[in-house]
Image (cartoon, rainbow, N blue to C red):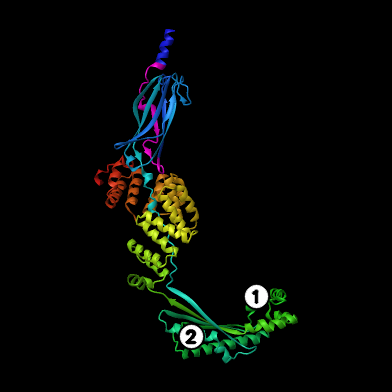
Amino acid sequence: MLAGGLLLLTGCSKNMNPFQADYFNCNPNPLEVVGQTVPATVTGNVPAKFFKKNATVTVTPVLVYGDQEKAATSVTFQGENVRGNNQVVSYEYGGTVTVPVNYIYEPAMQKSELYLAFEVEQGNKQYALPRVKVADGIIATAALADAKTVSPALTPDGFQRIINEQYSAEIKFLINRANIRPDQLTSPQMEAFNSDLAAAAQDTNRVIEGLNIKSYASPDGPYAFNTKLAEEREDNTKSYLEGQLKKDKITEFGELTADFTPEDWEGFQKLVSESNIQDKQLILSVLSMYKDPEQREAELRNLAAAFEVLADDILPQLRYSRLTASINVIGKSDAEINQLFDTDPKALTVDELLYAATLTDDLARKNAIYTACTKQYPDDYRGWNNLGLVEYEQGNISAAANDFAKAAKLAPNNGEIALNQGLIALNDKNFNEAQALFGKAAGVPETNDALGTLYLEKGDAAAAVKAFGNSKTNNAALAQILTKDYSKAKATLAGVQTPDATTYYLTAVLGARTNNAEMVTSNLKKAIELDPALATQAANDLEFSQFNISSVL
């Protein structure tokens, strides 16, 4: 009985001994950022004859950094004599315990230490055991993902330097005749054609690209006769037009071409299809059954009543020459557009203003142009969207959000606007809203980069790699580094069109992971030259812990 009492005292009454660091293993160690968080799992192997039977131990992961510390969610374990619902640890045999760890990452946490704090309740006693360090530092490479570097989507302008216009008129002929009647030359249609042609010739902003004549005979009568008739109509129309050009002193008109069609069966079929002729379907079936023109005509003539209607209503419309002028309207030059914006922006159309912004890389000038566009054309969503794009690239996220919202009211189903509003949500870490908006932007070219960055921010590097595809951006290279595809990451970084400090910093990280000391130091030097703040980050970055980088800091 005395021995049993001594055993009971040993198992219950004495305070617990301190936990030792070698009882615990942290995975990963050092800690590592995944998306927005720092997740880890601490596994403890409690030895036999250690955990008091009447003790309850609350374990709290505590991250210590600078002059701050942050506690994660606590986990409680209990001895076998304690009534409760916590995991039981045997006094006789010990046991394995698991402590999950998760923190929302902050840049100050990069240089840090992870401890476990222990609070014990044992009978009527409460006391703390010494903390135990289980991990040292955080690899924060994943935190280099940056939504602000994703290019927003531009809504394009409709500016065309050259706009082609077509003017046309028809000269109708009597049956079996090729002469041009005077009333055909004075018709409103023909007078308008001649007037437009003369005006174009005098306008320095318009160029007559070419003139064309197409002459036709109706598909009745012998084919050989119709061939000669259509050709004569072509010759007479061409002679008339050449004379009119001389009369109006038009010498620059590109090329004058002319051709003829002996029997206009295509036009015949179209007119019949669009008509209300009683036997329309019967006539169309004849056309489909017979391909020889003379047999077609013979079969149609057998439809006596129908052919009479055709002769009165359809065939006269197929005896004509069509004159067509192709005229290019030359728009303002780049220099003229720029000058007008500087002197009289109200003289520019909305498309000219939108185009003007594409003529400069200066974000301040782009901002001024799009601002003018929204003032002059407030109901055009493109001005608001593109102004928001510039604000976003200038780092004015709040202003960009307001501009995108105005654009969305004017064009709620526009894909470019949806993508841009998704970027705003992504910057606010509102991942569900961002994903929904990116879904509405399907087909917009910038969507892949936006989705890739979203997956990076959510901590799914494999999905990010798939979304980025062959994109050559810092974010795409980061996803490849995180999935350990270092050769592809190297090619991606080399393909970034405008390398910045982050490009070189990521290349240094790649050098560290592939044990290339020269790659580390040379690229860190470039990164710090572009952004001196990276010196402090590099000094604390565990990616470079195995390299001497003091010469570049």
* Coordinates of residue 401 in the picture (x, y in percent): 40, 55
Query: Which amino acid is tagged 2?
Result: Ser
Say what secondary structure mark 2 lies in: helix
| Badge 2 or badge 1: first in the primary sequence | 2
- Say which element carries label 1: helix
Image coordinates for residue 349, horizontal then vertical, percent:
41, 71
Task: Determine which of the numbered discs, if any, sits on residue 103 in the image.
Answer: none
Mark 1 lies on residue: 274
Q: Which residues are magenta?
A: 12-37
Q: Residues within 10 Å of mark 1 (few under 14, many from 20)?
A: few
Residue shown at 33% from the left, 47% from the top = 508
Q: Is residue 300 above or below residue 427?
A: below
| Residue type, mark 1 in image | Glu
Residue at x-position 63% and y-position 77% = 266
- Whether the magenta-drawn stretch holds residue 33 is answered as yes
Q: Position of residue 466 (x, y in %)?
A: 47, 50
Q: Quadrant of residue 2?
A: top left
In this rendering, position of residue 322 left or right of residue 28? right
From the top left corner, tell me how far across and down residue 321 is, in percent: 58, 84
User: Few, some or many C-alpha atoms within 10 Å of disc 2 (few <14, some 14-19, many ≥20)?
Assistant: few
On-image quarter of the C terminus: top left
Image mark for residue 195: 2
Which is more toward the observer, 516 or 431? Answer: 431
The answer, for residue 430, to whether it is visible in the render is yes
Looking at the image, residue 291 sits to the left or right of residue 460; the answer is right
Q: Quadrant of residue 140?
A: top left
